[in-house]
Amino acid sequence: MTSNKIIRRLTMGMGTLAVGLFLQGCEKVFDLPEEKEFISENINYGSKVLEPILGRTNLMGQFNADASTMPLKFEIVNARYGDGRPVTDLFQTRQTYVWTAAYDGKETSLEQIEAKRKLEDRPLFEVRESGQFILWASSDDDLIEPRPIDTSNLVQDIRFFDLKVSNTGGTVYIPDFQLIPWRERPYFPSTDINPYSGEVAPDPTDPENPNKRDYIRPRLDNVFGGTSNRHLQSNDQIKDVVVYIRPFEGGNGHNLRFKFMAPDSSFMNPDLFNETKWSTLVHGFNVEKTEEYVQYDVAYPIPLVNLQTPYTTSGGNNATVNFQYSRKGFGGNLTYATFGLDFSIFRPGDWEIVFHFRNELPKFEDE
């Protein structure tokens, strides 16, 4: 580099430094105010009506910052019922699971899963730093009263609150959010549960008949009846196969069982479903197979997070299971039949998922 170029660069650097020192001096001499953050009067949410289901973790609220300077501080204020009574039940503190390390679906034991989360005391309902609202899974029907059984939506039963949003640029209040919680439904699908009362759901084709009810329906692919030799179905009109998701007694507190019930209410041997990949059916451990069920040790809820893994549907919203068996068709070729379910279980405990062949057994015999 020539001496002239060196001099020019030094001169430019000194000029930049001089400008900086001059501006700093101006701030001191003229006492210029510090630059404030910006907060828009038009910040808003996609909807101000929140309808979570109790007993499960609900993330709610699509926040629009409208170019406001981040981060923003959020605070729930003025929580009240429609008739003016103060709301306090939402802010009870209970223990809930919080992840301390990332779950990836590759854990090989319950201990590995539990090492990645811990119990923390949290208000049942709160607003996060992102502006999203969260109702934790520690909420239940006893702690927070759900919407009325009679399906009414009276203003005195609705919980209202306002949201205070602020940064150094100012404060904006977003008024009149509504929280209208649904009663607990501890599993999905829950088509067999009346969402208002929590009782058995009526038959959708004959809702006034107390002797009929709705069921959870599995998917069926190439499943033939052993007697009728027709495709078995599960829909509003024909319910050849239905599913029960229910607690059972005698487990260790974190068991999940799969059972298969015949029309006479006896239980079928899981070995009949000879193509099923039992070792990778769910993210569970210590597989136990008897003549009446297959059981796993699992961590709840199922699935643990909304993450796609080999055990979940696309997007990770639900776990998915498939049971498969084969038999020889015409010409001696193997034909395969599959049935299964996409499901979630939100409440810890011992649960069984029962596939009930109500009218006839599947066809297992070769042609």
Image (cartoon, grey):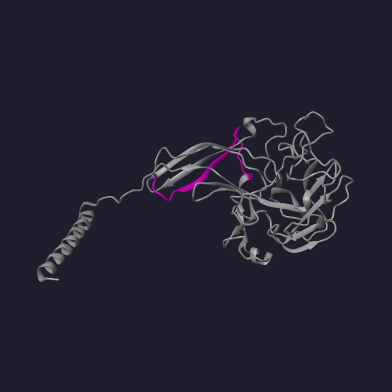
Where is the N terminus found, in terms of image quarters?
bottom left
Q: Give the image location of residue 341, x and y in percent.
A: 71, 48
Q: Nearer the viewer, residue 325 or 86?
A: 325
Q: Return the x and y of residue 306 as percentages of the image width and height.
A: 60, 52
Give the residues in magenta. Answer: 68-89
Is residue 217 a member of the stretch shown in magenta?
no
- Left or right of 202 in this view: 133: left
**Corner quadrant of residue 276:** bottom right
Question: In percent of the image, x 52 and y 46: which residue is there?
Answer: 132
Q: Residue at x 83, y 32 (%)?
A: 210
Residue 241 visible to the viewer: yes
Could you say where residue 270 lies in the image, as x and y percent from the top left?
Answer: 81, 56
Task: Tell me: residue 127, above or below residue 297.
Answer: above
Residue at 57 percent of width and 61 percent of height: 102
- Evaluate whether residue 353 shows in this view: no
Q: Residue furthest front?
A: 331
Q: Position of residue 5 (x, y in %)?
A: 12, 67
Image position of 17 with respect to 43: above or below? below
Question: Is residue 355 shown above or below 107?
Answer: above
Q: Is residue 87 left or right of residue 129?
A: right
Quarter residue 22 falls in? bottom left
Of 6 and 12, nearer the camera is 6
